[in-house]
Image (cartoon, rainbow, N blue to C red):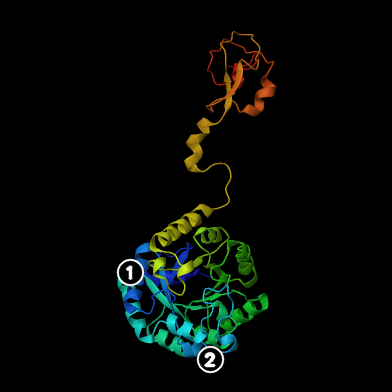
Amino acid sequence: MLTLKEELGAAHGLKADGSPFIIAEMSGNHNASLQRALEIVDAAAATGAHALKIQTFTADSMTLDLDEGEFSIRDPKSLWAGRRLYDLYEEAKTPAEWHKPIFDRAREKGILCFSTPFSEDAVELLESLNAPCYKIASFEAVDLPLIKAVASTGKPMIISTGMATVVEIAEAVEAAMSAGCTNLTLLKCTSSYPASPENTNLLTIPQIKATFGCNVGLSDHTLGIGVSVAAIALGASVIEKHFIIDRSEGGVDSAFSLEPGEFTSLVDETERAYQALGRIHFGGTASEQAGRKKRRSLYIGEDLKAGDILTPSSLRRIRPGSGLAPKYYEMLLGRRVGRNVSRGTPMSWDLLEGEDS
């Protein structure tokens, strides 16, 4: 299966290889301002991100307009403690009428734009805008009807797997593939905000790939970029991080979002990590060959006359590397030289008594 970047590359001007596909997630960081949303598009494009992702929902498509019970956030540790779910989604939504301006701005800036739909109506809206691919959020990974609706578009899909068991992931993969998806990426995700590195469990990434035969990546809610860079070494081909212009302005996801300078570092360092993977290789690369001269080898350390014995003071293990390898040191001690030899001569077999010169 082609990576997402390879799948989208030819049609959208991306480098069509296995290097990381980096997604800047706007989420609700527009703070209910279309102008701010457009500025986020501009800023994301300037970082070198390959795609900007938004979210397509209404409060009514997410929950019920109720106060009691689980319709309000009671966890005092939550970033949104005390908030009603309905009010939170109303604040964070990206209105339908904003979608076209955002998509158009992204095209002007040369960055892909797509979305996470949370309902079939959202899929219809995004199809009208020719979205190049789709993302299913972790909390919707169990919404198999929604997954099937997205898969039926035939577009590449990304599914976050936060909280999902192996069985639930298998059900989501089966739903997507059976409904028409031919390019699927599963993202390892820890659905806490922010997430800690200790709870990220990146070693799950290669296991997901081996189990489901899909592309893999990371939806990263930790602070900083270190976790994302590490994910590349474990086979991640997609990285998604929340993006904001200025954390100090606040926003529903501001606490775990990267600012432009940080996101530029994410793009650069994940690309560098990918390049460093290379292939399994021993024995020195072409660029290292000149360095062989700097290795230790055996040299004559004193002026010697024919018949003199090689001793620790007259046979030295030093740099540079033009003499015999140090592994012959013990073998050569006590042997006699067959001719006069000047200090600084690289040791060679033909210097020995009884050897052809």
Query: Given this view, does label 2 or label 1 mark the residue nearer the observer?
Result: 2
Visible residue check, residue 120:
no
Specify few, some or many for label 1: CA neighbours under 10 Å numbering under 14, 14-19, or 20 or more: many
Name the secondary structure under disc 2: loop
- Report the quarter where the N terminus lies: bottom right
Amino acid under label 2?
A: Leu
Visible residue check, residue 265:
yes
Which residue matches tag 2? 66
Using the image, tell me which numbered label, if any, was put on residue 201. none
Residue 315, compared with residue 250, is above or below; it is above
Which residue matches tag 1? 42
List x then y, in percent, for residue 107: 33, 74
- Report the quarter where the C terminus lies: top right
Asked where in the image residue 28 lies, by quadrant, the reply is bottom left
Specify few, some or many for label 2: CA neighbours under 10 Å numbering under 14, 14-19, or 20 or more: few
List x then y, in percent, for residue 221: 52, 68
Observer-nearest of 1 and 176 = 176
